[in-house]
Amino acid sequence: MLFSIMMLSAPESEPRRAALALGTVQLGLPYGVANSDGMPDEAGAFQVLDAAYAAGITAFDTARVYGEAEARIGSWLRSRPGASPVIITKLPAVQAGSDDERRGSIRDNLNLSRRMLGVGRLQMVMAHRGTDLLDPLVSDELQAAVDRGEITAIGGSFYTAEEALQVMAVRDLAGLQLPLSAVDTRAVNSGVLTAASERGTEVFARSVFLQGALLMPPDRLPPHLAPLAAVIRELDGLALRWQIPIAHLLLLFLRELQGVSYIVVGVERGDQLASHLEAMTRPPLSAEQRQRLNELGEDLPRSVLDPSQWPR
């Protein structure tokens, strides 16, 4: 494996379960269609980071463009000298310009991430627009940062499995992040999870709750997400029948999915983590339950499943 940060220790005879990673966009921006609390203050952000780390969540996912998130993680690390989580950050999409301008932008953003986080070396840097890694200048500049000891590993964040497979065909990735949930299994059907597993690439599944939309009452959905109403009502019925909360069903579906290393979850308050952590201790879903969940999103259009296509 190119860069393993997996903290699980299941015997080789047992399938490897995904673990939780803390998504930190909510700590730096007001984020999420279901977010009613806004962005926490620094004390609230520290509470979230403390709760996650104390519970054994050792991978924190952040990005240069997540507002104050990197700076808050850096402040937290300085105030908690014994803490040593793995930090995954992201290089902003590289904009058009001359070669020198683009190289300078990459170096400036990497240096700023290191300064905000207060670290000499970034453990994993993902290209926030993963297809940027198809550009030899971007790929070579990140590799040069590895060679200089400024980065340990390189990954990519993707909107689709097809994008991830396209990049994986031309370069090794230590990690990749893409949307994946019980109602959005396009990545499973594409073969990207198998390809990642064969290459030793850690997969970070995001949008497990579709920015919280899957946990909202159907009558509170914004108009562009109206097609989710029927799915949420079905989820409500299944949760009642099986006596398992909806959020737990969605997490358990991914926990057993082979090829997924981490499930990225974000919260605005530390106490919100308790339910996610409880879900990860539950017994596995049955094959019948997994199949029923897998059918939920079959007719949902990409305009609903892909937050990048939502109105801004």
Image: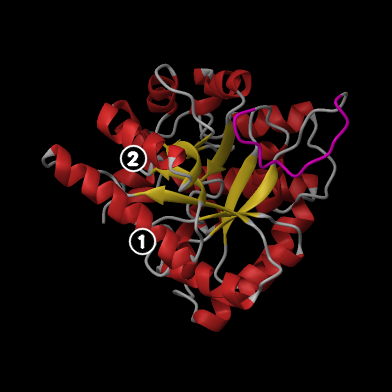
Tell me how far mark 2 sits from mark 1, CA to CA.
18 Å
- Image vertical order of residue 304 relative to residue 46, above or below: above
The answer to whether the residues at label 2 and label 1 have Cβ atoms under 8 Å apart is no
Q: Describe the element under mark 2 as helix, strand or loop.
A: loop
Q: Which residue is mark 1?
A: 112
Q: Quadrant of the C terminus?
A: bottom left
Q: Position of residue 290 (x, y in %)?
A: 70, 31
* Residue type, mark 1 in image: Leu
Residue 190 shows up from this direction: yes
Disc 1 element: helix
Count of marks, rendered view: 2
Q: Residue furthest front?
A: 148
Tag 2: amino acid: Arg
**Closest to the observer, 221 or 154:** 154
Identified at 33% across, 50% down, the residue is 224
Q: Would residue 119 be counted in the magenta stretch?
A: no
Residue at 56% from the left image edge and 83% from the top image edge: 43
Q: Residue at x 62, y 68 (%)?
A: 49
User: Foreground: 100 or 53?
Assistant: 100
Looking at this view, is 297 or 93 the one in front?
A: 93
Q: Name above or below for residue 245 compared with residue 100.
A: below
In this view, the residue in front, 248 or 230, is 248
| Residue at 49% from the left image edge and 19% from the top image edge | 190
Counting residues from the N terminus, which is met first, the one under dot 2 or under dot 1?
1
User: For residue 129, which numbered disc appears in the image?
Assistant: 2
Which quadrant would the N terminus be assigned to in this image?
top right
Point out the frontmost of discs 2 and 1: 1
Mark linked to residue 159: none
Q: Is residue 10 in the magenta section?
A: yes
The boundaries of the magenta stretch are 1-12
